[in-house]
Image (cartoon, helix red, strand yellow):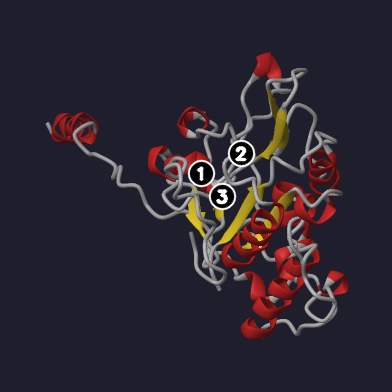
Amino acid sequence: MIGRAALGCIAMAFALAACGERTQTLTDQKKSDVPGWKGGNAAYNAPGWVASDQAAWEAQLRARAQSQNDYATPATK
Amino acid sequence: MARMKFICDAERCIECNGCVTACKAEHDVPWGVNRRRVVTLNDGEAGERSISVACMHCSDAPCMAVCPVDCFYRTDEGVVLHDKDVCIGCGYCSYACPFGAPQFPSNGTFGMRGKMDKCTFCAGGPEANGSEAENAKYGRNRLSEGKLPACAEMCSTKALLGGDGDVVADIFRTRVLNRGKGSEVWGWGTAYGKPAPGKGQAPVEGKKS
């Protein structure tokens, strides 16, 4: 009798397991990115700025972009 | 800082494919994937024009909108990047992108489509800046080294401009003002229409058109 009840419980547990539902909500799996101004591999850093100094990094990129400007004066180039 | 942008000056591009080569070499991009390519309009005819095209790092990027696993993100500088560990290679971004920027390596079994690959504006990916893992998945992170994208810096005629949007816009505008033409070929004139006859005044120095 007890064995039959236990068997019934196990069968019920299996049957009800199908009623369970795993969450399908899209979780934020993306890794967070470190900003470029914090620097990377220092061995390849362009001279003229210090890693972790955002203002210096932005100034460096603006100054470097002037190398694309044919009309820039030598001082700004 | 403004948003990072590319602009290609069609008056200067000579279809040398130096930008394509620089990109492939810098990031060790696999065969079959071209993050950047040169498109020529009216090829072989007088007045043909070439432009270098890659991901334009859109402000309202359609690839981000359609990605079912939300693998895209935008950096503080406006660079659109993606996480290859989240990408499932479905290809929706490829259909959504008007520039054909998303690329898929297809050298797997039965032409299986791999993780999406695209221009990163030389800003790498979500892995640690300059790390081997980042280099292997996304290529070199030049921005974190204080450099601009290799394609733009390697352009021999300086047709392809890349960097802070305000700076490259100023450079392009100065060129157009100096040569007296160009915006009607490719740029704001193409995007927003040509000025009415007699009202085609060049923008005043220092003001955005």
Sequence-first tag of 3 and 1: 3
**Residue B124 image point, x, y percent:** 68, 56
**Quadrant hosting residue A55:** bottom right
| A60, A6: nearer the viewer | A60
In the image: residue A52, left or right of residue A14: right
Question: Do tag 2 and tag 3 residues touch (Cβ < 8 Å)?
Answer: no
Residue behind mark 3:
B83
**Residue B101 image point, x, y percent:** 60, 36
| B208, A65: nearer the viewer | B208
Sequence-first tag of 2 and 3: 3
> Which amino acid, mark 1?
Gly
> Which amino acid, mark 2?
Val
Q: Chain of mark 2?
A: B
Q: Report the residue at 69% width, 78% height from top.
A: A57
The local secondary structure at tag 3 comes to loop
Residue behind mark 1:
B189
The local secondary structure at tag 2 comes to loop
Measured Cα–Cα span from mark 3 to mark 1: 35 Å
**Mark toward the viewer: 3 or 1:** 1
Q: Residues within 10 Å of mark 2 (few under 14, many from 20)?
A: some
**Quadrant hosting residue A60:** bottom right
Q: Chain of mark 1?
A: B
In the image: residue B135, left or right of residue B154: left
The C terminus of chain A - image quarter? bottom right
